[in-house]
Amino acid sequence: MRRVFGRILPFLMILFVVNVLDRTNVSVGALGMNRDLSINQSLYGLGAGIFFIGYFLFEIPSNILLHHFGVRIWIARIMISWGVIASLMCLLRTPGQFLLLRFLLGVAEAGFFPGVVFYLSLWVPAKYKAKAMAGFYIGFPVAQVIGAPLSAGLMHWGQTLGWSGWRVMYLCEGVPAIVLGIVCLFYLTDSPSNAEWLTREQRLWLIRELAAEQRSLESVSGASKSELIREVLQSRVVWILSVFYFGITCGSNALNFFLPTVLQSLNQRHGLHIGLVETGFLSAVPYATASVAMYWWGKHSDKSQERRAHSGMAAVFGATAFSVSLVASSPAAVMIGFTLFAVGLYCAINVFWTIPATLVTGLQAATAIALVNSIGNLSGFFAPMFMGRLYMHTGSYRISFFVIALVVAAAGLGLSRSPLIRERKANLI
């Protein structure tokens, strides 16, 4: 497993870093783009969130096609197409074009995250899953750690050249996805049976371990593909997981799209002088802390082989700590609150993704993971739009963040206490 982790996890993490960067760099780009294109906070919230409508519509079809064509080919296709669209953001001229390209970016990226989760299920036995997910999902906070300073730095560099800084940023951060998509075709291996970089004994051991787990899960013998997919779509467990994931990701999406804007607002409220580059580095602090915490929390979950409480209560902790910081409202309290919120959210999400693969395998696993991810990520549409519209009415982010924290806490509590979710040998229906 050390050899498997060393081969696939660093590469998958790099892919995820680029994925997150191209999805969320709009939060930094907005500091210049909104002014140049006359985009208000409500329209920006819609544009940030409309990405997830395209993502939702094409998530399940994309993962079914991934199961048909193979992970290597399909992930390469996803990365190349999203890299092209992300680069085209540098050509924006109107708010309508902004909305269109954000929607198309969601269509292009659909299937990447659940595809990788499914790919890990083909390689990693259950007792190693939280550690594996942490190794991959750490790419999200890492992307935020390097992303905000990088995006701000590229914008500043573009401005010194006399160009629109946000246009330079979009172009420079879109091209790597195209390059890495081509690399995927040569680097990824579809299954352990094809892994020439493992010894024969290692391949046989891993194949036996994974086959034994698959046999332990309930399945429909002789069922057609359409019947297997229909069973997933009718599953109460899968839909309940989707609802809980929606609640938790309301918090992560609000954090991702509005943290730089909130930090900038501290300039007006408290008379601070936080520049563009300083905003980028301050935005990185919560994610840097979360990247350390989530790896430790994942190892703790693997050691205890407990998932629901590790995921749910981490979300409750983050939401509670954040709510307390909002009451204090000082700049230091806000930063501490955002940091603890990020720690709770990403520890929760990391462990959460060990649960679906313990329920089903094969095509059903690909479909279930895609369904949970697509429904859950609709929060990426509703949370930014809710935040933007409420800000337009109140002139403050505090009330909207209180509501978001309440939703996260309710989802975490529900996940940790729900009697319908069984982590091993579950009956989907």
Image (cartoon, grey):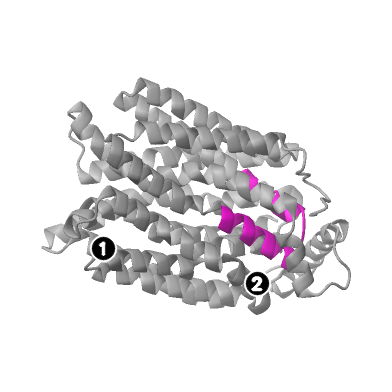
Q: Where 377 falls versus 366 (above or below)?
A: above
**Distance of label 2 from label 1 (alpha carbons):** 33 Å
Q: Which residue carries the number 1 mark? A: 95
Task: Judge whether residue 362 can be spotted in this image.
Answer: no
* Numbered badge on residue 64: 2
Helix, strand or loop at mark 2: helix
Kindly give the residue lying farthest to the left in the view shown. Answer: 162
Q: Is residue 254 left or right of 126 when viewed as pictured?
A: left
How crowded pointer 2 is (Cα within 10 Å; few <14, some 14-19, many 20+) is rated as many
Which residues, given as a range, are shown in magenta?
Answer: 350-375
Disc 2 marks a residue whose amino acid type is Ile
Residue at horizontal 51 percent and vertical 76 percent from the top: 77
The answer to which of 123 and 88 lies nearer the viewer is 88
The reply to whether residue 323 is in sight is yes
Q: Taking 412 as reference, is 372 above or below it?
A: below
Which residue is found at the position 68% from the left and 59% from the top? 368
- Identify whether 83 is placed above or below 14: below
Residue 196 percent coordinates (x, y): 69, 74
Counting residues from the start of the chain, the first of labels 2 and 1 encountered is: 2
From the image, state whether disc 2 or disc 1 is nearer to you.
Answer: 1
Residue 39 location in percent, x, y?
A: 24, 55
Do residues under tags 2 and 1 come within 8 Å of each other at their CB atoms?
Answer: no
Q: On the rendered structure, is 395 left or right of 313?
A: left
Is 354 one of the magenta-colored residues? yes
Q: Residue 316: x percent and y percent?
A: 57, 31
Q: Residue furthest top?
A: 328
Identify the residue shown where x is 31% and y is 53%: 44
Which amino acid, by three-letter code, is at mark 1? Pro
Location of the N terminus (image quadrant):
bottom right
Check if residue 56 falls in the magenta segment. no
